[in-house]
Image (tube, rainbow, N blue to C red):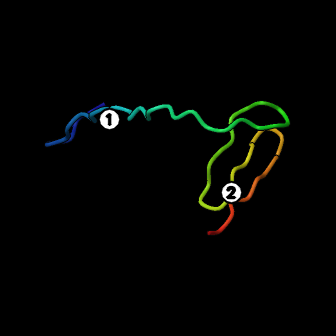
């Protein structure tokens, strides 16, 4: 391939690694519950627990 004038090679961005936070476990299947703003939910079995508004 012909290179165009002033073309720079693409730089690879480093992926940010998120720190592991131990969360609640699903009472049905035992996998970790995803924490949303208003609820906790399991992506594996569909269990949902709504957070109380205080």
Please identify the quadrant where the N terminus is shown: top left
Where is residue 38 shown, x and y percent of the image?
A: 65, 62
Residues at marks 1 and 2, CA–CA distance in whole angstroms: 33 Å
Foreground pick, 8 / 44: 44
**Quarter of the view holding residue 51:** bottom right
Q: In this view, does 24 lie above or below 30?
A: below
* Residue drawn 59% across the image and 60% down it: 37
Label whose residue precedes the other's in the sequence (1 or 2): 1
From the viewer's perspective, is 28 left or right of 33?
A: right
From the viewer's perspective, is 7 left or right of 12?
A: left
Q: Residue 39 carries which label?
A: 2
Identify the residue under disc 1: 13
**Quarter of the view holding residue 18:** top left
State yes or no: discs 1 and 2 in contact (Cβ < 8 Å). Answer: no
Where is residue 11 shown, x and y percent of the image?
A: 27, 34
Where is residue 22 shown, x and y percent of the image?
A: 57, 33
Q: Using a 10 Å C-alpha cutoff, classify the residue at mark 2 as few (fewer than 14 neighbours), some (14 to 19) or many (20 or more).
A: few
Q: What element carries label 1?
A: loop
* Residue drawn 81% across the image and 37% down it: 27
From the viewer's perspective, is 23 left or right of 20?
A: right
Pick out the residue farthest to the bottom: 54
Q: Using a 10 Å C-alpha cutoff, classify the residue at mark 1 as few (fewer than 14 neighbours), some (14 to 19) or many (20 or more).
A: few
* Residue drawn 69% across the image and 50% down it: 40
Please identify the quadrant where the C terminus is shown: bottom right
Comparing labels 1 and 2, the label whose residue is closer to the camera: 2
* Residue drawn 31% across the image and 32% down it: 12
Where is residue 52 shown, x and y percent of the image?
A: 69, 63
Q: What element carries label 2?
A: strand
């Amino acid at each position: 391939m012909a290179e165009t004038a002033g073309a720079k090679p693409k730089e690879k961005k480093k992926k940010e690694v998120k720190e592991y936070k131990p969360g609640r476990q699903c009472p049905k299947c035992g996998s970790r519950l995803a924490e949303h703003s208003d609820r906790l939910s399991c992506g594996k079995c569909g269990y949902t627990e709504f957070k109380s508004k205080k």
